[in-house]
Image: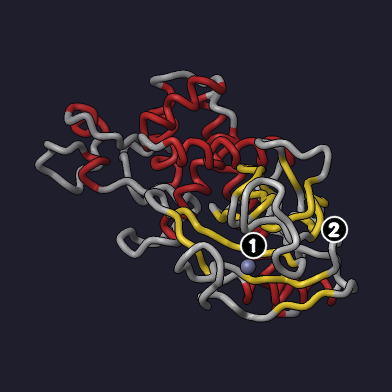
Amino acid sequence: MQPETAVASEIDDIYAKRMALYERIETVTTIPWYYLAAIDQYERNVRQSRRDLPKAEGITGIYFKPEEWVGFTNPNINDEDPKTIEFFNGIGFDGDGDGKASLDSDDDVLYAFANFLLRYGTDYENIKIGIWNYYKRDKSVRIIMGKAKLYQNYGRLNLDEHVFPVPIGTHYSYRSTWGSARGWGGRRIHEGTDIFADYGLPVRATSYGIVEMKGWNKYGGWRIGIRDINNNYHYYAHLSGFSDDLKVGQIVEPGKVIGGVGSSGYGPKGTSGKFPPHLHYGMYKDNGYTEWSYDPYPHLNLWERQERAK
Ligand SMILES: [Zn+2]
């Protein structure tokens, strides 16, 4: 077996195990699997990007603090008895029916979260309220509901495919410029990679995602923001315009044309031509309380090579 094949089948295997877990919990709670998958994925992404939380070890990415699990006034921080946990209002739950509410059991952990949501209801609006009451943060709710929409639409968990933002084989150039100074609008660092190309060259969504923002900004001109399945926000700026059918909240797939390369920006709405046409491509990550910019260059490079190899 080739090493790449081994890795690919391991990934398929983890997705299959996760899906089986979501379907087990859906069967018992009637909460649709794609909401459970979305919460689980959100938590996994948050843990991957935070140093103050332990990394996910099991099938599920959901994390409960031990004191939240057993109940804040519970004197036994390692309590696994469902009865005393319930008495101390802990979130812990015995989902797999072994008589113990264990933080090491994927079924117990996901069922505990599902059980929290059941206090509100299992339809779209009530799930949304339940998620808001858990995170108390609008952005977390929006990101999770976006993921749920993607999972429901595609009926699968693997939505990791990427493409380069302009068509491969066309005339374009880019280099690593992240963090360098830039000229307009005061002292800001360059949070992205500029891909220089001819005016009007199609700009494509690089990932599966939800259009989170679309419109004018005095720096970015006509710009679009797309949130992918891994809490990443992909920012496309200085566009010549947008594809006609593009709306905020809509699903896009890798390769979907979202607009054209342009030179809009650096002034009031409609300003164009103050610099050579290029796509400014930025990547941001949300970690559950804040969002920060990181260098897209290595990712662009990888997607370009992967697409060339196809
Ligand atoms: Zn730029």
Q: Is 264 on the left-hand or right-hand side of 168?
A: left
Quadrant of the drawing holding the C terminus: bottom right
What residue is disc 2 on?
A: 202
Q: Is 71 on the left-hand or right-hand side of 298?
A: left
What residue is disc 1 on?
A: 11
Q: In terms of depth relative to the viewer, which is nearer, 263 or 108?
A: 263
Furthest-right residue in view?
169
Three-letter amino acid code at disc 2?
Answer: Pro
Q: Is mark 2 within 8 Å of ligand 1?
A: no
Residue 5 lies in quadrant: bottom right
Q: Is 36 on the left-hand or right-hand side of 235?
A: left
Q: CA distance from mark 1 to mark 2?
A: 32 Å
Furthest-left residue in view?
75
Which residue shows up at 43% across the image and 61% down it?
49
Residue 115 lies in quadrant: top left
Which secondary structure lies at badge 2? strand
Which secondary structure lies at badge 1? helix
Expressed as whole percent of the image width and height from the top left, the position of residue 122 reads 52, 21
Q: Marks 1 and 2: CB-CB under 8 Å?
A: no
- Circle 2 crowding by C-alpha within 10 Å: few under 14, some 14–19, many from 20: many
Three-letter amino acid code at disc 1?
Answer: Ile
Which residue shows up at 38% across the image and 35% down it?
112
